[in-house]
Image (cartoon, helix red, strand yellow):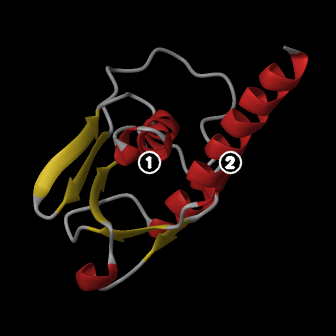
Amino acid sequence: MRAILTLVLCGLTTESLLSQDKPVKIMLATTSSTPAAFLLENLPKVGCPNVTIVLDESNADYVLEAQGGDFEGAHGSEGSHGPRPPRPKARYRLFKNSAAVFGTTPVKEKNAVKDLCKYLQNGSSK
């Protein structure tokens, strides 16, 4: 019984590692306001180290339209803040073959990156 459980756990671990290692090529849409440098810095931090940004749509697996809401910069929002007006939401939409396959609209842009990474790890394989 223990041997079977070990084999199952090893299989699950190997499968999850393989799905994370699959390289993904993304092209940023011309309407994107999020800099590619922000994505390249933050995607590896949230578990997507194998995402690359390409310039040619014919080489891309996906096209990403990334519009930051309250753009925090590379290191996020630091320090105390006084009363703030309502913050605009970030809007990330991912397209494959001109069809929208994923979208998210959190307030913080780093959360949009996390959501995108989760989709690339899990949702894109379905």
Q: Secondary structure at mark 1?
A: helix
Q: Check disc 2 and report the residue beneath it.
A: 17
Q: Which mark is residue 120?
A: 1
Q: Is residue 40 above or below residue 80?
A: below
Judged left or right of residue 67, residue 76 is right
Whole-percent x, y for residue 20 in the image: 60, 51
Residue at 31% in and 20% down? 86
Identify which amino acid the numbered label 2 is placed on: Leu
Residue at 37% in and 39% down? 123
Q: Is residue 93 above or below residue 79?
A: below
Query: Is 123 or 98 nearer to us in this picture?
Result: 123
Residue at 60% in and 36% down? 77
Judged left or right of residue 47, residue 27 is left
Query: Is 107 or 52 nearer to us in this picture?
Result: 52
Identify which amino acid the numbered label 1 is placed on: Leu
Whole-percent x, y for residue 62 in the image: 30, 63
Q: Is residue 43 above or below residue 58?
A: above
- Residue 48 is at least partly visible in this image: no
Whole-percent x, y for residue 47 in the image: 64, 46
Quadrant of the image for the N terminus?
Answer: top right
The quarter holding residue 3 reads top right
